[in-house]
Amino acid sequence: MAKLPPKAPAKSTAPDISVIIPVKNEAAGLAACLQGILDQTVPVREIIVIDSGSTDGTQDIVKSFPKTVLIEIPPSEFNHGATRNLGVSKAKGELIVFTVGDARPMASDWIEQLLKGLTSPDIVAVGGAQSAPPEKRTNPVEWFQQRSTPAVTVYRFESPEAFARADPKTRWQATSLDDVTALYRRSVLLEIPFRKIVYGEDVFFALDALNKGYALAFNPAARVFHYHLENYQTILKRTIAVASLRYQMTGYETPPHAFGRAFLRAVALLMRNNKLTWSERFKWIRYNYDLGRAIRDGLIMVRQATAKGGEALQALHEQYCGTPPIPLKASST
């Protein structure tokens, strides 16, 4: 009997995924981030961590985990768009997942939920959502509370002209990718690399991809825990940056902030939270009051500048956001 030739190894049907994480001084939360990725229901090929000058032992944490690849760059070379492009150029996976060093998956199916957004070949990126972890150090008003069943939303337009004709709010929603929790097809990131900009590389990629005829998806079930302790100044700066970016990209004017109603809702949530002491309730009431004022004041500034024209809006942005908003680091206590 003739000897049969050996069987060819079965081709794996598992998704081929590289995770890319830019970091600097993330020792406090990076181990939880990396372990959360390794514990996913969908295994990843590699975790590429790009460090831009950490001095807190971040590099040692990266080296202690399997599947990690450490890339070190000088702090002067970090750029939100270009640094992520560097990671893409080194990645081996067909799909790229982005997150940050102080985020961690909310559940073991985080990547699985991102993959659920790839329902057709023209969808080139999937965005998720983020929430504050329910911990003593975080604002209880921002703790995740599921109010409806998450569903995948897809945005596609027949042409760049059709995208331009869409109402501004739809255009903004369609471009609201967030690299704290997002998945991309690597082939398209090589075709449409992130712009070399200091802020908003994800939303500009979305704009460029939609204008090239690609579709984008969003699945709020692909959720990570991510939190930054803020104050009046950091929220004011962030509000101006985001609202001016929305308007410049899509013409969408962010509605005025309903400060009074939002603050009363925050107070009611805090007073009903039996896990908090009275001193903690009052601390977070004050915190939410300051944050609400910052959002209100920032949106007023943007609307006033918008009414005066593009130069005034650009001047406001340069005054407050010449550099990207740098959040405070939340303590672990």
Image (cartoon, helix red, strand yellow):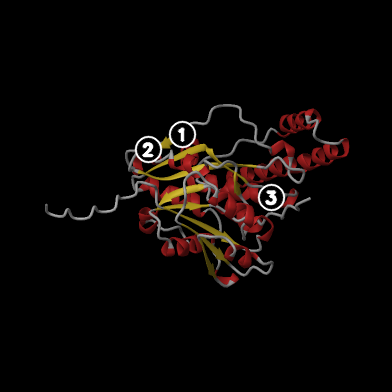
Q: Is residue 260 above or below residue 321?
A: above
The answer to whether marks 2 and 1 mark residues whose Cβ atoms lie closer than 8 Å is yes
User: Residue 231: which disc?
Assistant: none
Q: Secondary structure at mark 1?
A: loop
- Percent across and percent down for residue 310 are 54, 51
Q: Please report whichever mark, 2 or 1, sits nearer to the chain's N-terminal start.
A: 2
Crowding around mark 2 (Cα neighbors within 10 Å: few <14, some 14 to 19, many 20+) is: few
Q: Nearer the viewer, residue 70 or 331?
A: 70
User: In the image, is 186 to the left or to the right of 4?
Assistant: right
- Closer to viewer: mark 2 or mark 3: 2
User: Residue 119: which disc?
Assistant: 2
Q: Amino acid at mark 2?
A: Thr
Crowding around mark 3 (Cα neighbors within 10 Å: few <14, some 14 to 19, many 20+) is: some
Tell me how far mark 2 sits from mark 3, CA to CA.
33 Å
Q: Amino acid at mark 1?
A: Val
Q: Please report whichever mark, 3 or 1, sits nearer to the chain's N-terminal start.
A: 1
In the picture of the structure, the residue carrying the numbered disc 3 is 228
Tell me how far mark 2 sits from mark 1, CA to CA.
9 Å
Crowding around mark 1 (Cα neighbors within 10 Å: few <14, some 14 to 19, many 20+) is: some
In the picture of the structure, the residue carrying the numbered disc 1 is 152
- Residue 94 position by quadrant: bottom left
- Percent across and percent down for residue 194 are 45, 57
Q: Is residue 15 above or below residue 92?
A: above
User: In the image, is 6 to the left or to the right of 12?
Assistant: left
Q: Please report whichever mark, 2 or 3, sits nearer to the chain's N-terminal start.
A: 2
- Percent across and percent down for residue 214 are 35, 45
The answer to whether marks 3 and 1 mark residues whose Cβ atoms lie closer than 8 Å is no
Can residue 312 be seen in the rendering of this structure? no
Q: Nearer the viewer, residue 79 or 225?
A: 225
